[in-house]
Amino acid sequence: LARGWLAVSERLDRMPTMDYADCVLYNWQRIDPAGPITPENIRILNRFTGLVDEEWFLKTHVIIESEASGVVSAIYDGRQAIETSDIDRLLAMLCWLEQAMSHVATNCLWIMFERQDDEGFL
């Protein structure tokens, strides 16, 4: 196992550790490839504890990542506005950032606790 893990990490130029990208970003697929990214239409490829609520917890992060693109865009555009001293653009991007964060909080974070089990993963 160790040799294989080291070979893969060297080929990908990554440390031989398991991080967020490994557990979440590269560890899911759509059930219906043409369907939306929703908890019902994605599955986690590898669970580490085997618990059902672990899958739900990891799915939540996939949903958050997919819905947070506006956050990333606002930060990127805001940084460009700072570099060009465009105050009006910066203010617009800060408003966009606030709306994007509100979207994520309102539409995504509740999913994490929807199936919470007191004895489970969370």
Image (cartoon, rainbow, N blue to C red):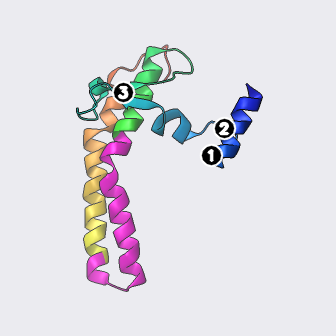
Which amino acid, by three-letter code, is at mark 1?
A: Leu
Q: Distance between the residues labelled 2 and 1?
A: 6 Å
Q: In which quarter of the image is residue 31?
A: top left
Which amino acid, by three-letter code, is at mark 3?
A: Phe
User: Is residue 36 something that shows in the picture?
Assistant: yes
Q: Residue 113 carries which label?
A: 3
Q: At 37% from the left edge and 86% from the top edge, which residue is drawn? A: 85
Q: Distance between the residues labelled 2 and 3?
A: 35 Å
Q: Which of 12 and 116 is in front in this view?
A: 12
Q: At 28% from the left edge and 35% from the top edge, which residue is drawn? A: 37
Element type where label 3 sits in the image:
helix
Q: At 26% from the left edge and 63% from the top edge, which residue is drawn? A: 96
Element type where label 1 sits in the image:
helix
The answer to whether 24 is drawn above or below residue 44 in the figure is below
Q: Is residue 71 magenta?
A: yes
Q: Residue 12 carries which label?
A: 1
User: Is residue 15 something that shows in the picture?
Assistant: no
Q: Are marks 2 and 1 in contact (CB under 8 Å)?
A: yes
Disc 1 residue crowd, few under 14, some 14–19, many 20+, Cα 10 Å? few
Q: What stretch is highlighted in magenta?
A: 64-89
Q: At 53% from the left edge and 33% from the top edge, which residue is drawn? A: 23
- Where in the figure is residue 80, as x and y percent of width and height? 38, 76
Q: Are marks 2 and 3 in contact (CB under 8 Å)?
A: no
- Where in the figure is residue 103, as x and y percent of width and height? 25, 48
Element type where label 2 sits in the image:
helix
Q: Which of 105 and 54 is in front in this view?
A: 54
Disc 3 residue crowd, few under 14, some 14–19, many 20+, Cα 10 Å? few
Q: Which numbered disc flags the more N-terminal residue, 2 or 3?
A: 2
Which residue lies under the disc numbered 2? 8
